[in-house]
Amino acid sequence: MTASRHAVALLPAGDRFEDFFDKVGVTLETFQSQTGGWLFNYVEALDRAGRDTVVVYMSARISSTLRFVHEPTGCRVSVIPSPVAHRKLRAARWRLAPGSRLLRSVEAYLATPPRALSRELRELGCAVILCQEYESPRFDVCVLLRRLTHLPVFATYQGAQHGHSRIEAPLRHLAMRSCRGVIIGSATERARVRGRYRLPERKIASIPNPLDVGRWKRQDRLEARRALQLPMERRIVIWHGRVQIERKGLDVLLAAWREVCAHRPDRQPLLLLVGSGRDASELHQRIAQLPDGAVRWVDEYVQDRDRLWRYLSAADIATLPSRHEGFSVAALEAMACALPLVAADVSGVRDLLQASSGRDTGIIIPPGDAGRLAEALGRLIDDEDLCQKLGSSARSVAENFSLENVGTQLGDVLLGRG
């Protein structure tokens, strides 16, 4: 990429880089070669549309601004030191009032350094700001910073629906009215935003998350299993993502899996879990209560997309029992690999499957219903022909979310045509 094209400044959610990445074992150094996820899918989609992206983080572990190039995509990354006020307030809150939602909101507003951010965006030639999540203090701050940056501000929805406390509400309403627009792939979330903020339709862009579907094609299943040392003869159900037991419905999945295995004692399927996160210790304890060999867990944040691609290719069925999603990249990755999906009926998943134009691509079950999940998984485990039929349809639907298609939509909304 070159600095000559006007760039989109993409600001991920969270106060600072380490707030999320420490939990999954990613450092600033390893981040430079990380691939996949909604963030870099956005970067690649915008690049296909001829638009540069600069990813901007804050960090408490640096004393001066750090710039580097993300190797797989070629996009520029800028890391700005966290403000001293933010560091001091966070330390005080953790020590004196760790549960204070009010202080958490104030802390989040202090996480974005106005002048340092404005100066960095100007030096990097940015023409527009895109925040991950409009339900965040960083979005409010960026909208209020327009007098310094002179840049239009957009936000994308990746799952956040609530702030830290009610003191954010007045600024949030002001920011939503004053921003240039919001990008929301979920129909349910679009309806919520229209009702809560009274936004006109012209400010809401219905654009899904993109995926490199040209690359994410199913590999040979047996070859993938040999490479990963997975059993050749067993039916494999895969889940991949961040280990957040409540949000991702992993408690429901393990309860359902116990039932699935109990009904198939002579041909036990395998549940393959790929991912890590803040609830890893608890998940280890829950898995230990299941029959030996019923679950195999790759307890790590898989940064190599090719490796994750191989895990998906080795499976027969994918599941997403989440209680809440934004617009699930994990589901889209599974569908691109021609896997039938058994998923909870939450907004992001519902929109994915509604894109099927009448074709069956999986089975939708109520959120939190372990019995229905077990029934649906068992049905696909026992019927290979149905799996192949649904998987083929899923692959066809996934092609609608290509980098080229979505990138063109994003580029037109954020920077206009030309």
Image (tube, rainbow, N blue to C red):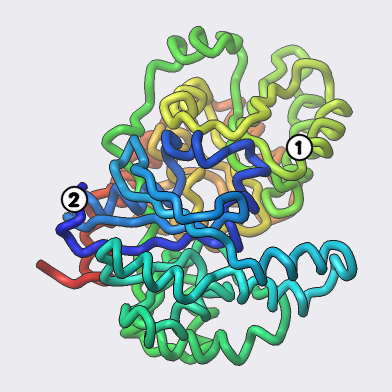
The one nearer the camera, 312 or 19, is: 19
Q: Residue at x 35, y 53 (%)?
A: 42
| Picture layout, residue 352 above or below residue 381 | below
**Residue 33 location, x and y as percent?**
42, 34
Q: Earlier in the sequence, mark 2 or mark 1?
A: 2
Residue at the farthest left position: 418
**Residue 170 point in image, percent of width and height:** 61, 92
Q: Residue furthest front?
A: 63
Image-quadrant location for residue 112? bottom right
Q: Is residue 402 left or right of residue 78?
A: left
Q: Quadrant of residue 101?
A: bottom right
Q: Residue at x 34, y 30 (%)?
A: 217
Spot occupied by residue 393 in the image (x, y as percentages of width and height): 37, 40
Q: For mark 1, give the secondary structure.
A: helix
In the image, 184 versus 148, the foreground residue is 148
Under circle 2, the secondary element is loop
User: Above or below — where is 208 with respect to 137?
Assistant: above
Q: Is residue 306 visible in this depiction of the protein?
A: yes
Amino acid type shown at disc 1: Ala
Reading the image, the residue beneath label 1 is 280
Residue for badge 2: 2
156 lies above or below 383: below
Give 22 or 351, whichever is nearer the viewer. Answer: 22
The image quadrant where one finds the C terminus is bottom left
Give the crowd class for mark 2: few <14, some 14-19, many >=20 residues within 10 Å. few
